[in-house]
Amino acid sequence: MKKVRGCMNEKCVANQKKTPYKEEDEYCSKCGHKLYYVCKKCYTQLPDDSGNFCVRCYAEKEDQKDRIIKTTGGVLTAVGFVVVNRGKKGINTLSKIK
């Protein structure tokens, strides 16, 4: 994912609307101030250009991934038990038919 830059001039329309700029852009097209790397989600200025998200948004994103994995794992386990139990009943039924 590409990094996003944003204008940090609080009086600028681009800052107020949280307009994202491309990584290649150096200056704001509205006010002319220098652009800085910003978080893609909350538009706060990043301390360096090492990531796409601030610490808080990155942690929220990782927590969401963990919740999805845990939920999906639980659902798949439950489905697995149902399939195994039905499979056993099916095998028992087939063995009685023969």
Image (cartoon, helix red, strand yellow):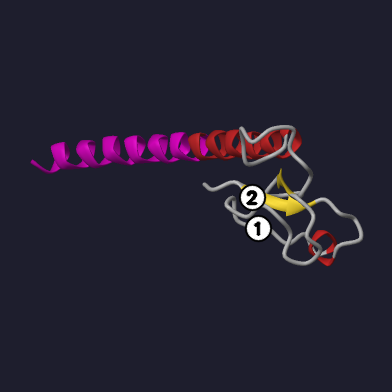
Q: Nearer the viewer, residue 40 or 69?
A: 40
Closest to the observer, 95 or 15: 15
Q: Residue furthest left?
A: 98
Query: In the image shown, does 22 or 53 lie closer to the viewer?
Result: 22
| Quarter where residue 77 is shown | top left
Taking 82 as reference, is 40 above or below it? below
Q: Are marks 1 and 2 in contact (CB under 8 Å)?
A: yes
1 or 2: tag closer to the N-terminus: 2
Which element carries disc 1, helix, strand or loop? loop
- For residue 22, what is the image quadrant? bottom right
Residue position marked by numbered label 2 in the rendering: 4
Please name the residue shown 28% across and 35% down the image.
88
What residue is shown with label 1?
21
Neighbour tally class for label 1: few under 14, some 14-19, many 20 plus, Cα within 10 Å:
many
Left or right, 84 with respect to 73, comes to left
Percent across and percent down for residue 6 are: 73, 53
Q: Amino acid at mark 1?
A: Tyr
* Vertical comparison of 62 with 39: above or below: above
Q: Magenta stretch: give its range.
A: 74-98
Q: Residue at x 57, y 52 (%)?
A: 24
Q: Principal SS element in the magenta part?
A: helix
| Residue drawn at point x = 66 percent, y = 52 percent | 26
